[in-house]
Amino acid sequence: MGITLTYTEQELVSLLRNRDNKAFAYLYDNYASALYSIVLQIVNDAELANDVLQEVFVNIWRRIEQYDAGKGRLFTWMMNIARNASIDTLRSRGYQNSRKNQSIQGNVDTLQARDVLQPGVDTIGLRKMLEKLRAEQRILIELAYFKGYTHEEIAELEKLPLGTVKTRIRSALIQLRGLLK
Amino acid sequence: MNIQEYISSGIVESYVLGLADEAERTQFEQMCTQHTEVRAARDAFELSLEQHAMAAAVAPPARVREAVLQQLAAGPDGDAGKMAAPVVQLRPVKRGAIPMAMRYVAAASIVLLLGSVGLNVYYFNKYQDFSKRYDQLLAQQTELAKNNEVLQTKLGNYESTVQALNSPYMAQIKMEGSAVPASPAPDGKATILWDTRTKDVYLMVGNLPQPQAGMQYQLWAIVDNQPVDAGMLDMDKGLMMVKMKNIPRAQLFAITLEQQGGSPTPKGKMYVMGKV
């Protein structure tokens, strides 16, 4: 029992839905690091990231019934839970307030310096790839993906037409896909 | 719509990374079910994203793992805060539904209680009223009994007066104002009853003016031309026979008006007199 610790996604989901603690331990052992990396890229604070990661796994455990394999892979689902929990944490706690003035209301140069080019965190994951994008695209991905703003909010913040925001984000994403391969 | 153009529009990445809006997501999910190419493009991007994330993984501290697993072991719902603090779940106390009959009984008992309270107030007021009336009656009764006692005494006195008047041993000496020269009360009358055996003297006032304040009538027996005090009069006794002093012998009785309490020898004016 439990000697072969490899499951297909389907098996894993099924066991998780049966509240199998071993399967959950397996899930943690296999995905915690990848998800931790995603959380870190957004909250950019190790202590905070520990709390968020814990919340992420509790959410996965609670919401596993809601996972729909028809709409995507398990990891994609978990990744989005991690991203949402991280952004929620940033928006609460007043943590956001201390940075908001600089990142949102400040000009583009400040944003780049403080939020896009964070030393340490920007060397991992998607953030690392952002470096290869043009600055104008980089900011939009930063705001949309890492800060969780809607296209409308970004259009207002950046004083750009909504259509331009959408087009730039789409083209940035296409570039990112090319970089992932 | 050209499927290849749709796939390469960035919608796949937008959807997978969670940047698509509601309308875009709905449309994309529909396209996935209708076009295997779209779904294949999605799967491919998801897989490359996952592989990239795995490659970029950063190990969290071991204590996070402990906290997570501990939290889940604590309860299937893991309904706790972010740290694995012990959680006390407060559940509402479940009570069975109250049957309709019991509701009616409860409603009826409340009505009865209210009625009972009302009656209590009513009867308490009644009780207070009766209690007051009882006290009044008791006072009346006491007063009546006292009056009765006074009347009984008076009646007893009258009886003995009548008896004395009819007694053959009682000598009657009428004293009159007319017998006194220059009497202030020419029509004054009083009667002496003198027990011939015991020599006790009784006095009945018939008609004498009410003395002014500080003055009192005094009875005298004149023995061998010397006045002897025979007692003081209380005018409020009326026609009743009042026992005076014992006088062994006398020739004459008279009443003068003296200072309150009397005098050793008569000083005031004589009102009435009568010979024995």
Image (cartoon, helix red, strand yellow):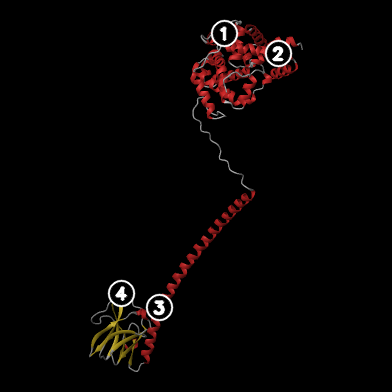
Give the residue at x 46% y 67%: B135
Tell me whether marks 1 and 3 sit on the same chain: no
Query: Observer-nearest residue: B51 or B170?
Result: B51
Label 4, label 1: how many angstroms apart (C-alpha)?
A: 134 Å
Amino acid carrying mark 1 in the image: Lys
Mark in front: 2 vs 3: 2
- Figure quadrant of residue A55: top right
Q: Describe residue B5's horizontal placement relative to residue B115 as left or right.
A: right
Residue lying furthest bottom in this view?
B168
Mark in front: 4 vs 1: 1
Subunit under mark 4:
B
Subunit under mark 3:
B
Q: Is residue B56 above or below residue B80?
A: above
Q: Secondary structure at mark 3?
A: helix
Q: Earlier in the sequence, mark 2 or mark 3?
A: 2
Residue B87, given in percent of the width and then of the height, sits at: 51, 31
Amino acid carrying mark 2 in the image: Ala
Q: Describe residue B118's horizontal placement relative to residue B222 as left or right.
A: right
Q: Earlier in the sequence, mark 4 or mark 2?
A: 2
Label 4, label 3: how many angstroms apart (C-alpha)?
A: 30 Å
Tag 4 and tag 2, C-beta contact below 8 Å: no
Label 1, label 3: how many angstroms apart (C-alpha)?
A: 126 Å
Please name the residue that numbered disc 4 is placed on: B214
Subunit under mark 1:
A
Please name the residue that numbered disc 3 is placed on: B149
Residue lying furthest right in this view?
B1
Please name the residue that numbered disc 1 is placed on: A128
Amino acid carrying mark 4 in the image: Gly
Tell me whether marks 2 and 3 sit on the same chain: yes
